[in-house]
Image (cartoon, helix red, strand yellow):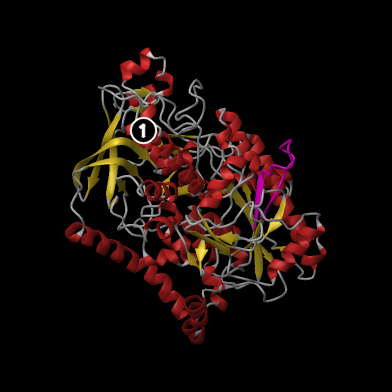
Amino acid sequence: MILKFLFLLPLIILVISTQILTPLIYRYYEYWDYYFGPPPPDEVFDFIVVGAGSAGSVVANRLSKNNKILLLEAGGDPSPFTSIPLLTPENFILPENSWNYKTVPQKLSNQAMKDKKSFWPRGRALGGTSNLNYMLYIRGSPFDYDNWANLTNDSGWNYNNLLPYFKKSLDYNGAYKENEKHYGQTPYGYLHVERKRYESPLAKYFMDAVHELGYKEVDTNGGQQVGFGDAEVTQKHGSRHSTWKAFLENFQHRKNLVISRYSIATKIKLDSNNRAEGVFYMRHGKKRFARASKEVIICEGSVDSPKLLMLSGIGPKAHLNSVKIKPKVDLPVGQNLKDHITTSLFPFLINDTISTVPTRDFGLRTILDYVVNGYGPLTSPGGILAQGFISSSQIPNKSWPDLQVYFMGFGFYPEFMSDYSKTTLYNETLTSRYMESLDGKELDAFGLIITLVRPKSVGQIQLKDKNWETPPLIDPKYLENPQDVKALVEGLKFTLKVSEETESFKRLDAKFVDLPNFPGCESFPARSDSYFACYIRHTAFTLYHPVGTCRMGPRDDSKSVVDSKLRVLKTQNLRVIDLSIAPEIVNGNTNAPAIMIGEKGADLVREYWSQQYLISYRDDAFLRNGYLQCYYSKHV
C-alpha cells in the first residue's frame, strides 16, 4: 500500500496543485492587473468586442489588424494547469476558470442529479470555454450548414461557402494533410490541430468491431458521414491549444488591440434610435463605460450573450417587464436553446491489462512522458481513443447522423464515481448503491458514450432578475421530446452490440458488468427498452454544447434575433458573433463551429465597413430609395 501511494504521489500532487494553486494564480493575475495593469481606456474604439471566447478571440484578432479594438473579458489569463488535457474535469469545476452555471430542475431528465439540475461550466478567462473543453476538433455535417442556409435564406451559410472559414483558422498537423479540399494551410492559420497523442491497443479492437458491423473508417471532418475514426484535437505537442493560445497570446501587444481583463459587461448603451453607442462594464469593483464609433460585437456565448442583451432591454417584452427591465426592442432572445445530451453504459470488463487504470498505471513516468515528449495519458482528451457517428431509426436521412459515439480507454478505479460526480452533479447516494459491487476495485475495462447530436427538445434562457450578478435561469428541457429518448435507447443498444456480439471484443471476453437496475428503475426488465428509457432519464447529462439563443434567420421571421449578417434586428451597430446565433444545433462538438463563426463574422463586419463609400446620410439615402441597402445609415 505504501509503495502504491509513493508510485501515485506525483500525480496526486499534480491534481492537488491544480485545486490549490489555480485560485492562488488567479488572485495573483487579478492583483497584478489591478495594481500594474493598464489604466481603464478612455478613448473611443472602432469596435468593442465583448467576450474573448472561441469566437470572440478570433473576431478581436482579425479586426484589430486594421481597426482599433477594445476586447472585454470577465476573466484573466487562463491558469497554466488548463493546458494539461487530462486535468480538464479538475479545471472546469473551479470558479476561477468557469462560471459554473446550473440549470433549473428538469422535469423529465437529470433524475439522478442533485436537485435534478445539470452542471453547465462556461469559460471565464481569455479563450473562454476553449480552455475547458475536451479539445475534439469536429466540424459537424455538411447537412447542418446547408440547413442553416435554408433557414436563413442565405447561401453564404451553406457548407461549401463556410468551408474556407474552417480552413482559414487551421495550423493543421493531423492525419489528412493530403486532403487539401478540407484542410490545407493558410498564412492566417493559428489554431493547431493534431492527432491525439494517447494510444492504446484497445483502439484497434474497437475499430475491428465496428468494421464487423459494417461501418467504415472515415475522416469525420472530411465531409462528415456515418462511420468511425481517430480523434483529432486542438492541441500542440500534446498540450491544449485554446483560442487564447492561437489568436490572442502572441497578438496581445498589437497596437490596435486593447484587452481589458476582469471586465464584466453589464449593459449595452442604446440611443433613442436603438443604435449601440458603447458598453457599461464592471472592472475591479468599479463601473466603467467604453464607447464604440462603429459597432458593439457580443461574443459571450449561448448563455451570456442573451443575458447581456436582455439586461440591455433587448428581449421578449413580457419577460423583460416581469423582471422590471424597460423593453427597448422586442425580440425572442433566449429562446431556441438546444444542447447535446449524453449517456453511457460503464464499465465493459475485459480480460487483459490493456486499458488505462489511473490508480494502477499513473506515476512519475506519466508526468515525464507528458513534460518531455508531449505523449501519454495526460494528453488524453477525456480518455477518448476513437469516435464516430451513427444514425438511429428516428431520422429519415441516414446520411445525416443523429448519434455520436465516443470510445473510452480508461478502466475502473476506486474514485471513479466520485470524480464523475464532480462534473455531472450525480447524487452519490444513488450512484454508490448502483455500483456498490465495484466499490474499491481496480478493473480493466472500457466505456462507450452515446451523445444525441440532433435533439428535438428545445429550451430557453431567461433572467431571474435585473441584477447583472445573478446567474440566468437555464432550462434546456432535456428529453421533453420523446424521440430524443428513443434515439438514445437505440444508442445504448448499439454499445451492447458492438461490445458483446462482435468477434473482436469476444477475444477480450468483453461484457457489460453485472450491475443491478439503476435506483428508480427497478420495476423494469433489465436491458429492455423501457429500462433503458428510465436509465436515460435518470443518468443522461449535458455534453456542454448549448447553442441557438440568439437565433439567426430572415428579418421577417418572428423567431429571429439576428439576420444572416449577424446584426441584431431593430437595432443599429450591434451584432452577435458566437454559437448563440445557430438556427439549429450542429451534429458534433461545437468548438470548431464557434471558431468558424468568429471567422465568418469578422469578414461580414469588414465587408460592411469597407463598403461605406456607398452609404450616404440618412435622409439622402431614403430619398434615393437606397435606405434598404443602408442598414447602418449615417445620422446627421
Q: Position of residue 485 (x, y in %)?
A: 65, 41
198, above or below 459, in the image: below
Image quadrant where residue 174 sits: bottom right
Q: Position of residue 209 (x, y in %)?
A: 77, 61
Image quadrant where residue 103 sits: top left
Residue placed under numbered mark 1 in the picture: 574
| Residue in the image at 25% along x and 59% along y | 30
10 Å neighbourhood of mark 1: few (<14), some, or many (≥20)?
A: many
Residue range in magenta is: 388-406
Mark 1: which secondary structure? strand
Q: Position of residue 474 (x, y in %)?
A: 44, 39
Residue 297 seen in this snapshot: yes
- Left or right: residue 509 versus residue 282 is right
Q: Main secondary structure of the magenta part?
A: loop
Quadrant into which the C terminus falls: top left
605, above or below 20, in the image: above
| Residue in the image at 43% along x and 46% along y | 102
83, above or below 452, in the image: below
